[in-house]
Image (cartoon, coloured by chain):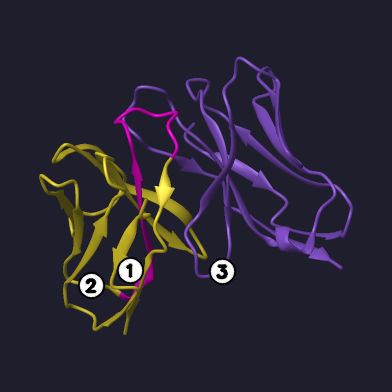
Amino acid sequence: KAGVTQTPRYLIKTRGQQVTLSCSPISGHRSVSWYQQTPGQGLQFLFEYFSETQRNKGNFPGRFSGRQFSNSRSEMNVSTLELGDSALYLCASSSTNGANTEAFFGQGTRLTVV
Amino acid sequence: QQQVKQSPQSLIVQKGGISIINCAYENTAFDYFPWYQQFPGKGPALLIAIRPDVSEKKEGRFTISFNKSAKQFSLHIMDSQPGDSATYFCAASRAHSNYQLIWGAGTKLIIKP
C-alpha cells in the first residue's frame, strides 16, 4: 500500500508570491490533516478535511487555505508569502474523521521563502 | 489549556540504557496520547499510543506510562540503540473532535554507541 505522498518535496518562493502544495493520502483514507513544522514553533495544526469538507481549523491567518477533492487528495495554498512561512509542511491521512486513529504522515514539503 | 509540555529538549543516552521522555497536559478532555518518532528528512511516524483507561502500554522496547491524576505521560525506551536516535514528539487529542493533534515541542534523542 502506497504511503502519503506530498509534492513537491522542496520549494523556494519569493515574498509576496503564492504557493500550492499537494497531498495524496493513503488509498481509502478520507481524512487529511495539514501541519506546519518549524524549529521555533514545533508542529502546529493547520486544518483537517474529511469528505471534501473542512472539519477543523487551527489558528493560522486566512492566507492559509486548503481544499479536498472527491478522490480525497488535498491541496494547501498559501498566498502573499512571508519569510515566516518558511517551514516543513506535513500532510497526514487517517481512515476515519475521528480522533484516536493513527495518522500517517508524508515526508513533507520544505518551503523556503526568500 | 491546549498545551502539551515536553521535556527534556534533548537527551543523550548510552547504548543499552533507558531513555525517558516526559509530557504534561492541561486539558482534561484529551483522551488520546500518541508518541511519534521523526528521523531527519522524514515525516513523523506513530510509535505507540495510549488512552487514559490504562496506566501503561508496552510495545517491544517502548513503553508509555500514563498518570491521569497528574496529567502526565512518559515514553520509556529500554535497551536504547543507536538506531533510536531521532526526535520524539508526544501529542494529545480529544476523541470525536475531528482530527487535531496538539504536539509537544519534541525531544532530540541521541544514543551513544
Q: Is residue B22 left or right of residue B99?
A: right
Residue lying at 51% horizontally and 23% vertically, measured from the top left: B31
Q: Which mark is residue B40?
A: 3
What hue represents chain B? purple
Q: Chain of mark 3?
A: B
Residue situated in front as seen by the camera: A70 or A108: A70
The answer to which quarter of the image holds residue B50 is top right
What hue represents chain A? yellow
Under mark 1, the amino acid is Asp
Residue numbers of the magenta segment: A83-102
Is residue A15 positioned above or below B5 on the image? below
Q: Chain of mark 2?
A: A
Question: Mark 2 sits on what residue?
Answer: A81
Residue lying at 60% horizontally and 14% vertically, measured from the top left: B53
Residue at the limit of the structure toward the top, as seen here: B53
Is residue B64 positioned above or below A114 on the image? above
- Asked whether the beta carbons under mark 1 and mark 2 sit within 8 Å of each other, the answer is yes
Residue situated in front as seen by the camera: A97 or A48: A97
Is residue A80 positioned above or below B24 on the image? below
Residue A7: x and y in percent read: 28, 68
Q: CA distance from mark 3 to mark 2?
A: 25 Å
Q: Nearer the viewer, mark 1 or mark 3?
A: 3
Same subunit: marks 1 and 2:
yes
Q: Nearer the viewer, mark 3 or mark 2?
A: 3
Is residue A103 positioned above or below B84 on the image? above
Residue lying at 35% horizontally and 35% vertically, measured from the top left: B99
Question: Mark 1 sits on what residue?
Answer: A85
